[in-house]
Image (cartoon, helix red, strand yellow):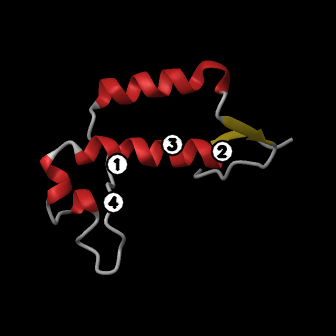
Amino acid sequence: MGSRRSEPGPDAELEWCQHVNDVITRTLIARTDSWWMGTEIPGKPRQAVAYAAGFVAYQRRCEEAIKGLRDYRTTARPCLSTA
């Protein structure tokens, strides 16, 4: 029997990306050409590559997502081991 894993559904992924982008646009970081926006790699789409709202906000969002795992689906595919 393989390990079970949970992963976000497509709607949850889109919502998270939109939230990350909404947060970053309220900062000066969004106006820079830096690794925060992925601009150090030619041809890479300009988008936030890190969460700028801080750990407490991230922890709150994780705790909300865990409640019933409402935005996640569970599969029986085995997880890859790094051991």
Q: Position of residue 6 (x, y in %)?
A: 67, 39
Label 2 sits on a secondary structure element that is loop
Q: Marks 3 and 4: CB-CB under 8 Å?
A: no
Task: Give percent across and percent down for residue 31.
Answer: 15, 58
Q: Looking at the rendering, which quadrant does residue 71 occupy?
A: top right
Q: Is residue 61 left or right of residue 68?
A: left
- Residues under labels 1 and 4: Cα distance? 7 Å
Seen from the viewer's position, the closer of residues 32 and 76 is 32
Q: Is residue 52 above or below residue 38?
A: above
List x then y, in percent, for residue 50: 32, 49
Q: Secondary structure at mark 4?
A: loop
**Dot 2 and dot 4 residues touching (CB under 8 Å):** no
Q: Quadrant of the N terminus?
A: top right
- Residue type at numbered disc 1: Asn
Q: Which residue corresponds to mark 1? A: 21
- Residue type at mark 4 is Gln
In this picture, residue 23 sits left or right of residue 27: right
Mark 4 is surrounded, within 10 Å at the Cα level, by few (under 14), some (14 to 19) or many (20 or more) other residues, namely: some
Q: Give the CA separation, mark 2 to mark 1.
A: 19 Å
On screen, residue 51 above or below 43? above
Q: CA distance from mark 3 to mark 2?
A: 10 Å
Please report the residue visible at 22 percent of the width from the left and 62 percent of the height from the top: 35
SS under mark 1: helix
**Which label was assigned to residue 15?**
3
Residue 47 is tagged as 4
Question: In terms of depth relative to the viewer, which is nearer, 25 or 41?
Answer: 25
Front label number (3 vs 2): 3
